[in-house]
Amino acid sequence: MSRGAGFPINDLLRRRLQTGLVVVTLTLSVASTLFLLLFSSRVGVGLTASSNVFTIALTSVFGQFILFIGILVFLVGAVLTSFIVSLMMAQRTRDFGLIKAAGCPNSLVGGYFMTELLSVVILSCILGVVCGFIADFVAATIVFGGYVLGNWWFAPVVFVVFFGLALFFGLQPLLKATRITALDALSPVNYYGLVVGGKHKSLSHSGLAWRVASRSMVRRISSVARIVILLSVVFILLTISVAGGIIAKDTTMGWIEKTSGAGTGLIAVTYPHMGSQYELLLSKFTGTPQRDDFNYANPELAVSREVTERINNISNVASVAPRLVLYMDIQEVSNFTALNGVHTAIGGKREGTALVIGVNPSDISADFSSIGRSLSETDPLEAVIGDSIAQTMYCRDTSKGINISDPLLQSIRVTNTTLKIVGVCVDPLNNGNVTYVPLETLMNATGIAYPNLLLVTPKESSDRAVTIAEISHIAKSIDSTLEVIDLEPTLATNEAFLGAAWQTIMFIPLFSLASAAFCLVSYMMLVVDEQRQEFVVLRAVGARPKLIINLSAFESMIVLLSSFGVGLSFGVIITFLILMTNPIVTVTTLVTISIWLISTLVVMFVLSLYPAIRLSKTGILKIGK
């Protein structure tokens, strides 16, 4: 009895390479799905967002990518699971026939192979869950600087889903094998999934490898179609994650750089409490909590005009931008438009609180806004709002009777002053819950006569340490309590955090890609095994061993190139037409994407040749066994 129970395990161990490929493929499919769910909740998107980390616009961009990638990862996992498990059990058809021919009843044989299937699936799902948590731990430690166990209940859900998929697709070939006779089970037509029998035709020497490879693919048209569909989905996933990820990373980081001034070496001059609070507002982008009880209107925080003028006269300073930072109540101001000849209201009268910043329009570059335009120097009644305000206070809300809303067609009220919204910016400051208005307008509306913050931009050619020391010396000579703060480390941290988040998303499909590579190797092993008799005949008549490699290379090339073409086409369409608006695409970006995709194609092609290379080194007598 013990020997009978141990037969399935011993049989799996006897076929170590094939078993290992199946286990690794299923493990990576489970791990990639679990990791995607865990990481998406950490960045504030997905099924259960643990926190609102990014601005709403960035969260929306991340959400779209993770949604598409999540669908594709699950689809790839499902197709991979069905293909690799079906392939595994189909390869057992001959063994099924041999055991039946020896007189073993169907129920006992079915029990053997059912035990094999359950052993592989359970082991793969357990390893996949473990690997998913390990990947989440590594990503959380790198991106967020620490690990806290999140939505652990994702693990049993993913386990059950993939266990069910593997069991469902694995039982199909097993049940099919129980219904055929021992003679049919030993037939190559059933074992290799051929659509026609082995009717050998004479082959001319010209284009021999191509003729043999194409005939082999025609005989296995069903399995060829399945592997092409599988790899096409994988390449769609790869194109969206790599090409879309790189483009989205460059685009979103461009938004952040324009608004925050990252990379310009910004230096803040203010009083200590205000400086600490401003750094907290910037750091909120990376999840740092802020103080809600801070009094921005405290007159003791006012920076005198003398400080501004004297710092502006420093030779190493390019510009000094005074700012008045306040936390205030704001109100949406609706508008009207003609829609199909009917006077229709746009927006409503929603209220909220936000960080309101008074700036000199001349201190803001022309491309400050990601939508619309920047503040003009001629109109004092304009405002640029952050994306988080635009997508909360100025969004369509049918529950409140607001069917149309567009911030660029509406206004915003700060105290008793109404300002026309001319642009929307993506700003890491206060997670995008910010509004920029002309400095003089804000001063007049609030009665505050001086700014409470100076942002100094040094010249690119200047020595940074010397410039900071000189600014500090002048500021403290006027007021010893003033503080000079280097904002560049905080801004660089924001950029690094955003970049790490995108790189992690680009990392997710590597699990699926590795699974597809192992699946392709398993497929090519079956192809090579099916052609053993042909290889023996060809070797016997003088063909060189490298012919085996050439045959495998031709078939692998056809499968990969056709899949790559389909995947690349659909991936590019989804990336540019659906996932990103106004993307930033440079020559460097295109070169980087090309290198990634072509390198992946080459690596998969080389890996697919392993079964043929292995067989080509085998003697002619051993091949025929």
Image: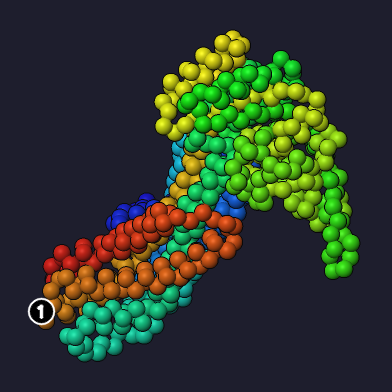
Q: Give 280 or 548, whichever is nearer the viewer.
A: 280
Q: Secondary structure at mark 1?
A: loop
Q: Give 380 or 98, whichever is nearer the viewer.
A: 380
Amino acid type of the residue that numbered disc 1 sits on in the rendered structure: Gly
Count the marks: how many?
Answer: 1
The quadrant of the rendering that contains the C terminus is bottom left
Q: Residue at x 74, y 43 (%)?
A: 379
Vertical relation: 137 (above or below) 541:
above
Q: Give 22 or 80, whichever is nearer the viewer.
A: 80
Vertical relation: 262 (above or below) 555:
above
The quadrant of the rendering that contains the N terminus is bottom left
Left or right of 73? Residue 193 is left
Pinpoint residue 481: horizontal percent, then vertical percent: 61, 11
Q: Give 511 or 522, whichever is nearer the viewer.
A: 511
Q: Residue at x 60, y 51 (%)?
A: 61
- Res. 135 visible in picture: yes
Q: Residue furthest right?
A: 343
- Res. 111 visible in picture: no
Please say which color scheme the image uses.
rainbow
Q: Residue at x 23, y 67 (%)?
A: 612
Pointer 1 local density, CA inside 10 Å: few below 14, some 14–19, many at least 20: few
Pinpoint residue 342: horizontal percent, then vertical percent: 89, 65
Pinpoint residue 118: horizontal percent, then vertical percent: 46, 55
Determine which residue is flagged by label 1.
542
Q: Residue furthest left?
A: 542
Pinpoint residue 425: horizontal percent, then vertical percent: 65, 44
Vertical relation: 445 (above or below) 186:
above
Q: Residue at x 78, y 46 (%)?
A: 420
